[in-house]
Each structure stands twice: as C-alpha cells, then as structure tokens.
Amino acid sequence: MKRMNHKTVSALILFLFLFGCAAPTIPNFSHQPVYLGDPGDISKKIKNFQIIHDLTTEDGKIDYLIERIRSSNLSFIRNGETHSSSAAAVFLRAKIFWYQSRYHVPIHTASAFIDLVANRSTTTGRPYEVILANGTREKVETVLQSELDFLNQCLKTSCYTNS
C-alpha cells in the first residue's frame, strides 16, 4: 500500500474541511407542520387579517406572520432569554429595519423574512425558539414556515371565505 505524502494529506484535510465528509442532509418531509396556535382557528385569523391587509403582497404576508407572533401569547426564546410574544414581534419588526439598513439587503418576501430575520440571532447564531402551548420548544423558523405554507395554501383555495 502506497503512503500519501504530506501535500496529499494536507489537500485531503483541506477538502474535508471545506466540503465536509458527512452524507448530505435529506429533508424530513414527514415532519408535521407546527403552528403558533390551533390550526382550526387559522382560517378565521386569515379572514380577519385580510379585512384590513392585502395578503396578496409579500409585505402583507410578513405583516401577517408578525401579527401571528404578536397575538399568540406564547413565550419566545432569543439568546437564552425568554420574551413575550408582543416583545418578539416588536423585535422582529425592528430587526427587519436593522437588517436592511446595516446590510442593505431589502426583505422583499415572507420567505426572506423567515430565512434572514426570524430564524436566528445575528449576534450569537443561536436559533430563535418558541415555547408552544403544550410546553414543547420549536424553532421559530419551522413554525413560521408552517404558518406561511398554510397561508399560501389558504390564499390559493380561498379557505378563509368558508370560515
């Protein structure tokens, strides 16, 4: 068996460092959606929100997600500290402005809001979490994506008109 020289070993280590050696992550499509409240009430909340907001725009969808947080009355975890739902909503609204002014990256879509603003602390890198009504913790990113998926499906099928 041939020995590798130190340049080959160094190149291999660099390659593994840059590209990793683990198998690619496969998305978990069996994961059940997790919501900020009772899924049976969401259609009614969408209907009520749509009365004064345009949910066909991305800004309207961002406003809806922030309102879902604010009105949830759940506890939110940021950098290990617990915050009220209203404080979390105010913080995320301010973070949109901060993110756009500091990084000059406009948040034009609800998906960008979830990915760039609502997923984790830019200071520590720790994900934001929510303590659900049943006491379990979930990543805010996961919950907001479920909320957004429900909203988009509802807008396609007009489910809120039947509530």
Image: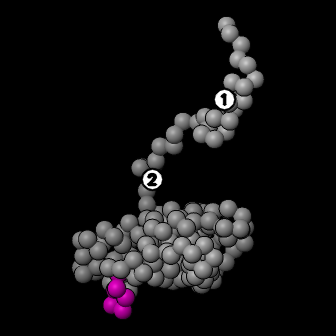
Is-magenta flag for residue 51?
yes
Label 2: which secondary element: loop
In the displayed structure, does residue 97 sit left or right of residue 161?
right
Q: Main secondary structure of the magenta part?
A: loop
Q: Disc 1 marks which residue?
A: 12
Rendered position, 109 above or below 91:
above
Mark 1 closeness class: few <14, some 14–19, many ≥20 residues within 10 Å = few
Label 1: which secondary element: helix
Rendered position, 119 above or below 108:
above
Instruction: Give the residue displayed 39% in from the left and 77% down from the top.
Output: 58
Residue found at the very far bottom of the displayed protein: 52
Report x, y in % for residue 18: 63, 41
Report x, y in % for residue 86: 59, 84
Which label was assigned to residue 31? 2
Q: What are the residue bounds of the magenta stretch?
A: 50-55
* Amino acid at dot 1: Leu
